[in-house]
Amino acid sequence: MLKSLSIENYALIESLRVEWDEHLNIITGETGAGKSILLGALGLLLGAKNEGQALKDSTHNCVIEAQFNIAGHNMESFFEENDLDYEDDIVVRRIITAAGKSRAFIGDMPVQLGVLRELGSRLVDIHSQHQNLVLSSEDFRIRTLDTLASNRELLNNYTTLLTSLSALRSEERRMVAEAEAARKEEEWLRYTVEELRAAKLRPAEQSETEQRLAIVESADRINETLLTLRNRLDTEDVGAISELGRSVREFSALGDKYPMAETLAQRLHAVVEELKDISATAADEAERIDADPETLQKLSDRLNTIYSLEMKHRAESYDDLLAKSEEFERKLAAIDNSDAEIRALRERIKEAEAECRKAAEALHDARMAVCPAMEQKMVEMLVRLGMEDARFVVSITPTADFTPSGTDSIAFLFTANRTAAPAPIERIASGGELSRVMLVLKAMLAEKMMLPTVIFDEIDTGVSGRIADAMGDIIASLSERMQVIDITHLPQVAAKTGAHFVVYKQEGHSNIRRISEAERVDEIAKMLSGSEITEAARKQAKILLS
């Protein structure tokens, strides 16, 4: 329930604050006084986009704030999902800065506009006369029927299944396209894979082969260096090993006369052993390394093969060539396996379609089940609104394809003429008839959805006399179960029991105030007779109010 609304620096409103009644709130006022501006500010508060005309004074912020009581409307989960603190009385605020930037708050927490918009849809339903055109929208008709049938769970289940089915169908299109594209290059791909398989490429092979080739190419020089080292270390009598060996023996002999001699002898011995190992390694390497022309040719041929494949496949490196080889293998495997994979996927699609069809049938059955009661109640209320011969039929036609809302095409058929067959309402109903049909639908929906607040903006356009009185009765009865704010130009509606507010313009500023019961007489008399209030109009106003 909307408890209070304050607006600062919005359009023609400089500053106002209004406290609302928890049941029926009637708003009247002359054309141009600012009733639509009031609704525009409320829409902005509930998440509507700022069209750039919010600021009355471009040097100050526009601030719109409202307090709502949401106790008993099961909104705790929404606050928990959005990490907000829940309270029965919650303040919602929207600020448009002088620079045109928007900020939104729920309680004291800043929120994204989408979160504010979602909360707004749960707090208030605003219906204007222009929304009568939504009857031509099949989406609106489907949502209306689903709301009355309490199909939320069924619709969520169907939507989940349809999402999965759509994903499978997208995957099928991708796989078929890839398979078709791959088959165009299948012959080349098979030849390339066989060529790369025959090459038997190994990880790190190129660097290893290049290193081996460099050794073989320099084998003579390497051997010469190795043998020279061995001779310098191990030549008898003059080699380094032999010379150092004598020093070891000499220091060992001084052990009892020179304390450091034994230590030096041990260290020299370790050096001698290391040099012996180096000499042996040099001898082994000299024997292993051979400038064999056959080995040289073999290594050269292998590198040429690798370089040729890299160039042919435009590989940036040997690792890139290996990666390309693996990719070619995968593509070829995909071609070989694609038919089986596509067949398997199509079986999964058939199963998903069957599940979707079952969920769509459950939706269809639920919709069909609620139609008789909806049609009966629509006719009963339309008769109350002066349409004694009204007929209202919900037509549900199955569709072949899955849609976001199932496999039903829904039309509202209507006639107010006893001799005419019902036809799509958007084609045959007059403006006044559309207003009455929409009022009935909105009343049924609001009662089912248990929205805290419903706002009617001149929904009674196109009617008058006793029909206007009947419309007022429906609006008033609706306010017994929820808060209703009704903007009207009809005295019959304005006279219904409730809080009465007048929107007026003073010194170029729009404002609103609640009027007393005594003031209501003159306000309704003005609506009956115009700017000059006659005594007859006052008498009629008192009759309406009584």
Image (tube, rainbow, N blue to C red):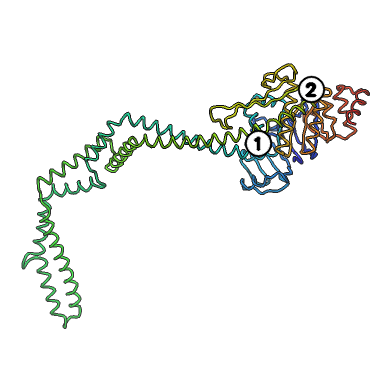
**Element type where label 2 sits in the image:** loop
Q: Name the residue beneath numbered marker 2.
A: 388
Amino acid found under the numbered disc labelled 1: Gly
Which residue occupies the foreground of this view, 406 or 354? 354
Image location of residue 42, percent across then percent down: 71, 35
Left or right position of 338 against 482: left
Amino acid found under the numbered disc labelled 2: Glu
Q: Name the residue beneath numbered marker 1.
A: 47
N-term-proximal mark, 1 vs 2: 1
Which residue occupies the foreground of this view, 324 or 198? 198
Which residue occupies the foreground of this view, 383 or 182? 383
The answer to whether any part of residue 179 appears in the image is yes
Quadrant of residue 530 within the rendered picture: top right
Q: Quadrant of the N terminus?
A: top right
Label 1 CA crowd tier, 10 Å (few <14, some 14–19, many 20+): many
Q: Quadrant of the C terminus?
A: top right
